[in-house]
Image: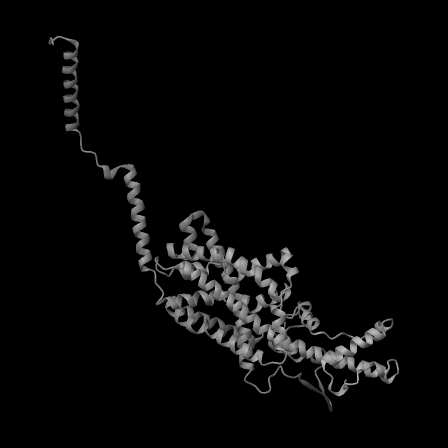
Amino acid sequence: MPKNSKVTQREHSNQHVTESVADLLAHEDPVDLKASALNVSAEECRGKQLEDLGDQDDRPAWNNKLQYILAQIGYSVGLGNVWRFPYLCQKNGGGAYMIPYLILLILIGIPLFFLELAVGQRIRRGSIGVWNYICPRLGGIGYASCVVCFFVGLYYNVIIGWSIFYFFQSFQYPLPWNECPTVKNQTVIMVEPECDKSSATTYFWYREALDISDSISEGGGLNWKMTLCLLFAWSIVGMAMIKGIQSSGKVMYFSSLFPYVVLICFLVRGLLLRGSVDGILHMLTPKVEKMLDPQVWREAATQVFFALGLGFGGVIAFSSFNKQDNNCQFDAALVSFINFFTSVLATLVVFAVLGFKANVMNEKCVVHNAEKILGYLNSHMLSYDLIPPHVNFSHLTTADYAEMYQVIKTVKEDHFQDLHLDACLLEDELDKFKERGWLS
C-alpha cells in the first residue's frame, strides 16, 4: 500500500495521539482513590460503626440467661396479671374472655414483644438510644416512654408503701381490721358508728391507713406512717438499682420468684375453703355470647399491651444487655406464655375466694328469707302444708330452701311478689360481685 494513502496517514496520526496522552498521564500526580468523596463517606460510616461496636463492648451484660428471663418476667408480671386480669375475666364472661385474650396474645402480643426484644438486643441501647439510632427526629418517643415509666413508678411505689404498712400491721393479734373499734361515751361502750355502718376492713383502710379527710378542700395534715412506708419503698428500689443490672440482677431471684410462692400458697389455702370449687367453675364456664361483643376484644387487646409492658421501654432496656446472638425469639414466646400462666393462676386464686364469699353470702340470704317464711307461717299467710316434711328450719340447707322456694312460688303464683322472697341462687351472688365492682 502506498505510504501517502489515507489509511497510512490515519495510522500515523493515531500513534502520535496515543503517545501524547501517555506523556500527559505520566506527568500527572497519581489519583488517591481513598481520598475520593465516596470513599470518605464510607470511611466515616465505618468509623461510626467501629465506635458503636466499641460502645457495645463496654455495655454491661447479664451474668447468666436466668437473670435476664427473671428480669423480663418480673417486669411484665405485675398488678395487671394479679388484679386487672381477674376483674376483666369476671366482667367479660369468664372463660369466654380467655379465648380472645389468647388469640390476641399470639397474633399481636408475642410479635410486638419479639420486636422490642430484637431491637434492644441488636442495637444494644436503651429506649432513648434506640429511637435516636433509628432516627434522631424520633428521639422524643424514647423520652416520652421514660416519662411514662416515671409516672408508673410513682403510683406503683405508693401501692408498695400500702403493702409495707399492712405487712407491719399484720404482726398484731387480733388483726386491727378484724373488728370495729369501740368508743366510750361516758359510761357506755359502743362500736364506732362509722365502722358499724360500713365494715371493719373499710374503716381501717380509710381512717387508719389513708387517714383521709372529710372533704377534698381539707388537707388533713401529713400521714407520717404512710410517708415512712413510702420512703422505705423508694429506698428498696434505690438499693436494688444502685449498681445497675449487677445489683438488680441478683434481686430478681427474689422479686420474680417470691410472688409465685405466695400465689401458690394462696391457691392451696383458697382451694381448702368451702365453696371454692363453685367460684372456679364459674370462672371456667364460658359465656359464648360475650365473645360476639367487640368491647370484649378491645379490652382483651388492651390487657395484652398492659400485661406485657409493651411500649414502655423496659423490654428494650432489659434486652439491650444481651449478646447479639441470643435467641430472642424463644425468649419472647417463653416470657409471654409465663405471663399468661401467671394471669390464669392469679385468677384461680381470686375466684376460689369469690366462691367462698358467694357461699357465705348465699347462706345469709337463705337464713334471712327463711325467717321471713317462718313469720308468714306464724301469721298464717302461708300454710304449713307448703313446707316439705324433710325441711328443718334449724338446719336449713340451700337445696332445701330452693325446693321450698319453688313450691311456694308455684302455689302462690298470683301473690308471690307480695312475699318479697329471694331465690338465693349461688350464680346470682357470683354475678353481684361484678355489679359491685368488687375486683375493680
Please tell me in which quadrant of the rendered image residue 220 appears: bottom right
Query: Which residue is located at x 42 percent, y 70 percent?
Result: 252
Is residue 322 positioned above or below 404 on the image?
A: above
Residue 33, x across and y down, in percent: 23, 37
Rendered image quadrant of residue 26: top left
Depth order, front residue of 260/74: 260
Left or right for 369, reference 240: right
Judge by depth and name the residue closer to the eye, 160 or 120. 120
Name the spot of residue 13 as percent of width and height, x first: 16, 15
Visual colour scheme: one colour
Where in the figure is residue 284, as x and y percent of width and height? 60, 68
**Would residue 368 be found to the left or right of residue 385 on screen?**
left
Depth check: 391 or 164 in front?
391
Question: Quick one: quadrant of the N terminus?
Answer: top left
Name the residue at 38% across, 66% down: 245
Tell me which residue sits at (58%, 81%) in the image. Answer: 272
| 297 sits to left or right of 46 | right
Give the position of the C terminus as an image quadrant: bottom right
Quadrant of the image occupied by residue 6: top left
| Residue projecting furthest to the bottom | 187
Q: In this orientation, does residue 211 appear?
A: no
**Numbered-mark total:** 0
On the question of residue 199 being in view, the answer is yes
- The answer to whether 303 is drawn above or below residue 9 in the figure is below
Q: Residue furthest front?
A: 389
Percent x, y of residue 208? 62, 78
Name the side, left or right, on which 377 lies relative to 440: right
